[in-house]
Image (spheres, rainbow, N blue to C red):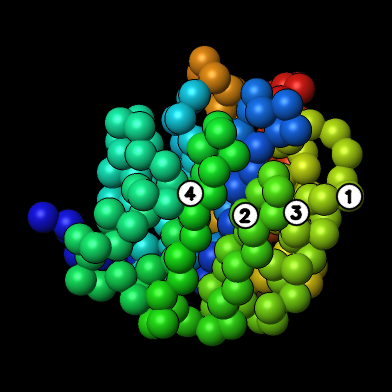
């Protein structure tokens, strides 16, 4: 049975980006929210499989079961459709999935708090809810498209652009970044509560001296 969301795993007011490197060797998901501990609920990733962001009235089953379905060979579109069919509260969800084959799927229910928005590009998906303005996701997409450097840094630059465009209506309190390759989790950083969580992610990423 598909589990219902609870107040403890809800992440209202969240913006996220899922992306793959041009050579398809790395995938990542980065997220920021006005809720605390967003990294424990929204971003999900598995080496050689894909990445998922599940937010709004968050149900982490979309991440856990979603990766399982991708592992079993379903496409993101098939996996998401199956999960939505099992969820009686699907209109409260905002979910994005992407695999190493660059296949993508996204869903935003009618009960997701405004402003919400979603953008699907060649190498990425951007989603957000309870935003100050829909320009938040537009800014994230544009920044990811023009930025240079590692996938991890580009994901964080996109989050930063979203925050500077208004971000969560309440401001951001937590953020997280996960990057996986075909073999392992390359980066996993979570900032559970901070006055400037995205900047703290940048600092922590720099301290790791990684190239992903």
Q: Which of marks 1 and 4 is nearer the N terminus?
A: 4
The residue located at (37%, 54%) in the rendering is 80
Q: Is mark 1 on a helix, strand or loop?
A: helix
The residue located at (47%, 82%) in the rendering is 113
Residue at image mark 1? 146
The picture places residue 21, in percent across and down from the top left corner, at 71, 33
Q: In this view, does 150 lie above or below 163?
A: above
The residue located at (30%, 36%) in the rendering is 68
Q: Is mark 2 on a helix, strand or loop?
A: strand
> Is 159 in front, or is 145?
145
The crowding category of the residue bearing disc 3, from other C-alpha atoms within 10 Å (few below 14, some 14 to 19, many at least 20), is: many
| Mark pair 3, 4: CA separation | 18 Å
Q: Which of marks 2 and 1 is nearer the N terminus?
A: 2
Image quarter of the N terminus: bottom left
Q: Which of marks 3 and 1 is nearer the N terminus?
A: 1
| Mark pair 2, 3: CA separation | 11 Å
Q: Earlier in the sequence, mark 3 or mark 4?
A: 4
The picture places residue 134, in percent across and down from the top left corner, at 68, 78
Residue at image mark 3? 158
Residue at image mark 4? 97
Q: What element carries label 3?
A: helix
């Amino acid at each position: 049975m598909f589990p219902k969301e609870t107040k403890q795993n809800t992440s209202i007011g969240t913006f996220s980006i899922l992306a793959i490197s041009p050579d398809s060797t790395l995938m990542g998901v980065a997220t920021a929210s006005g809720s605390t501990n967003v990294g424990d609920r929204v971003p999900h990733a598995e080496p050689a499989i894909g990445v998922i962001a599940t937010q709004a009235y968050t149900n982490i089953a979309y991440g856990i079961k979603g990766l399982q379905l991708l592992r079993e060979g379903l496409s993101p579109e098939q996996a998401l459709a199956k999960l939505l069919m099992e969820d009686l509260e699907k209109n409260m969800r905002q979910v994005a999935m992407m695999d190493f084959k660059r296949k993508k799927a996204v869903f935003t229910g009618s009960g997701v708090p405004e402003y919400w928005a979603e953008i699907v590009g060649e190498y990425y998906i951007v989603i957000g809810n309870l935003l100050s303005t829909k320009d938040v996701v537009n800014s994230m997409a544009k920044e990811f498209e023009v930025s240079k450097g590692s996938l991890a840094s580009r994901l964080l630059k996109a989050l930063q652009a979203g925050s500077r465009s208004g971000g969560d209506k309440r401001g951001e309190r937590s953020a997280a970044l996960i990057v996986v390759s075909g073999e392992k989790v390359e980066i996993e950083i979570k900032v559970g509560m901070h006055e400037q969580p995205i900047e703290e992610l940048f600092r922590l990423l720099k301290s790791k001296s990684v190239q992903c």
